[in-house]
């Protein structure tokens, strides 16, 4: 495993009806309770049905990522059986009748038409995402959306919804999922990552290690960090990000999305699971606005 851990390694464990968890490396900024209360219903878990799907078999470095993801499921997948069983009893699967799932871009795996019923006991959350305001679109990380053939979105009230990849952008590591549902979700407003300042407080939301709908706090540590020669300049934050956070929103104290969790710098050696040491990176929301134009 490289020291810089991309989303396949920010992936993770079983769905559990966990209490909302707010953890922080430093005191939470004023207003964080209000922002969290308003934003969390728009945050989702990205899940896969492990009884049907397995990580795609690929070669080289991608195969190494697949093996790391498999090890992660084996290590953490049954760590919280009580929470998983509670979720299985309370989850509310939804599968639209007679509707075909939107097709993903050619070459991408996507849900098939009429996905049918899913047994919540078979689901594992391995990433995060969020609904965009006034849409049925979910933004997540491309490395999350590309891990499994069939994807499900899990909401804070434990509703399970089939989803299909509408946009997949590997350069920015962003993906847009389209969810077929009659239920209205509030969605998060998109802020302006060009105006945020170094030192400004932010909150990170997601599902680290399968602990669903967790909030951590920190500040913007730097802007314009280049992790890849062809990729966008990243927002650096010390808000703790861990496996399972990938694709989740980074929000400002107005509750607007300013970035999407992408990667962490970790001290883990190759083959070890990494965890936060206060060096996290997010894709700026300006990139999100661009890929959303392709989905609408």
Image (cartoon, grey):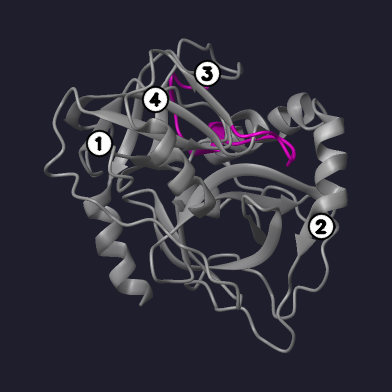
Q: Earlier in the sequence, mark 4 or mark 1?
A: 4
Q: Earlier in the sequence, mark 2 or mark 3?
A: 2
Camera-nearest residue between 270 and 146: 146
Element at label 1: strand
Residue corresponding to mark 3: 275
> Relative to residue 209, is residue 266 depicted above or below?
above
Expressed as whole percent of the image width and height from the top left, the position of residue 177 reads: 50, 64
Residue 295's quadrant in the figure? Answer: bottom left
Classed neighbour count for the residue bearing mark 4: other residues with Cα under 10 Å, few (<14), some (14–19), many (≥20):
many
Classed neighbour count for the residue bearing mark 3: other residues with Cα under 10 Å, few (<14), some (14–19), many (≥20):
many
Camera-nearest residue between 135 and 13: 135
Q: CA distance from mark 3 to mark 4?
A: 16 Å
Q: CA distance from mark 2 to mark 3?
A: 29 Å
Q: Are the residues at dot 4 and dot 1 in contact (C-beta closer than 8 Å)?
A: no
Name which residue lies at 32% across and 49% down.
172
Disc number lying in front (2 or 1): 1
Residue corresponding to mark 2: 52
Residue corresponding to mark 1: 234
Bounds of the magenta segment = 1-20
Element at label 2: loop
Q: Are the residues at dot 2 and dot 3 in contact (C-beta closer than 8 Å)?
A: no
Is 87 placed left or right of 246 in the picture?
A: right
Residue corresponding to mark 4: 217
Magenta-drawn stretch, dominant element (helix, strand or loop): loop
């Amino acid at each position: 495993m490289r020291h810089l851990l991309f989303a396949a390694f920010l992936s993770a464990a079983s769905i559990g009806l966990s209490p909302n968890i707010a953890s922080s490396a430093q005191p939470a900024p004023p207003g964080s309770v209000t922002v969290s209360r308003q934003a969390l219903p728009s945050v989702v878990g990205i899940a896969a049905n492990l009884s049907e799907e397995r990580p795609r078999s690929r070669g080289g470095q991608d195969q190494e990522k697949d093996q790391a993801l498999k090890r992660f499921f084996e290590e953490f997948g049954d760590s919280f059986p009580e929470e998983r069983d509670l979720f299985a009893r309370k989850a509310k699967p939804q599968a639209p009748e007679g509707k075909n799932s939107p097709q993903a871009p050619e070459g991408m795996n996507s849900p098939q038409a009429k996905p049918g019923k899913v047994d919540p006991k078979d689901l594992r959350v391995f990433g995060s995402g969020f609904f965009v305001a006034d849409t049925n679109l979910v933004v997540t990380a491309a490395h999350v959306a590309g891990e499994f053939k069939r994807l499900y979105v899990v909401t804070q009230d434990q509703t399970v919804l089939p989803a299909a990849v509408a946009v997949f952008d590997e350069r920015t590591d962003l993906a847009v999922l389209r969810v077929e549902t009659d239920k209205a979700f509030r969605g998060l407003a998109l802020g302006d990552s060009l105006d945020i300042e170094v030192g400004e407080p932010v909150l990170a939301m997601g599902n680290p290690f399968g602990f669903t709908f967790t909030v951590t706090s920190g500040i913007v540590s730097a802007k314009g960090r280049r992790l890849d020669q062809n990729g966008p300049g990243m927002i650096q934050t010390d808000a703790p990000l861990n496996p399972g956070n990938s694709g989740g929103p980074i929000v400002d104290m107005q509750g607007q999305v300013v970035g999407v969790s992408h990667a962490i710098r970790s001290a883990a050696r190759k083959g070890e699971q990494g965890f936060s040491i206060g060096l996290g990176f997010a894709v700026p929301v300006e990139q999100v606005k661009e890929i959303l134009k392709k989905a609408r």
